[in-house]
Image (cartoon, helix red, strand yellow):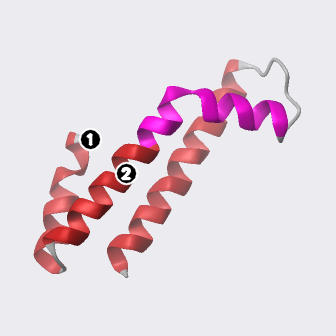
Amino acid sequence: MLAFVPALVWIALETSTIRAVAVGVLVATTHLAVDQGRLVRVWLRNVKSAVSPSPALSIAVDQSFHVVCLFGAALVAAS
């Protein structure tokens, strides 16, 4: 989360502190949910029908979820 502090400061300076806090909360909560692992396992099992996925697939899905979450946070920051 510390890596996002410069970006959050920039968002606060360019838009508002409330938006920067909202983006920070969005990034933190989505990353915690993804990093917890349950969401990735459920998605792999129920959507991709991968009962025992390889570690590489799990990592790829985890990183893909992170990219999607960061894209959503960028949309919130830019709106």
Residue at 34%, 45% in the rendered image: 28
**For mark 2, does the 10 Å Cα neighbourhood hold few (<14), some (14 to 19), or many (20 or more) residues?**
many
* Rendered image quadrant of residue 49: top right
Residue at 52%, 52% in the rendered image: 67
Element class at badge 1: loop
Is 77 one of the magenta-colored residues? Answer: no
Element class at badge 2: helix
Q: Which mark is residue 49?
A: none
The residue where tag 1 is placed is 1
Question: Is 27 rendered above or below residue 47?
Answer: below
Coordinates of residue 10 in the picture (x, y in percent): 16, 68
Q: Which residue type carries mark 1?
A: Met
Left or right of 27, for residue 55: right
Residue at 43%, 41% in the rendered image: 31
Coordinates of residue 66 in the picture (x, y in percent): 51, 46
The residue where tag 2 is placed is 27
Left or right of 23, for residue 42: right
Whole-Å distance between the Cαs marked 1 and 2? 8 Å
Question: Is 64 rendered above or below residue 69?
Answer: above
Instruction: Give the dominant element type of the magenta stretch: helix, strand or loop.
Output: helix
Q: Looking at this view, name the residue that lies furthest to the right.
A: 49
Extent of the magenta region: 31-46
- Mark sitting earlier along the chain (1/2): 1
65 or 25, which is in the foreground?
25
Q: Which residue type carries mark 2?
A: Val
Residue at 29%, 63% in the rendered image: 22
Whether pointer 1 and pointer 2 mark residues with C-beta atoms closer than 8 Å, the reply is yes
Coordinates of residue 41 in the picture (x, y in percent): 69, 28
58 or 46, which is in the foreground?
46
* Rendered image quadrant of residue 70: bottom left
**For mark 1, does the 10 Å Cα neighbourhood hold few (<14), some (14 to 19), or many (20 or more) residues?**
few
Coordinates of residue 14 in the picture (x, y in percent): 16, 79
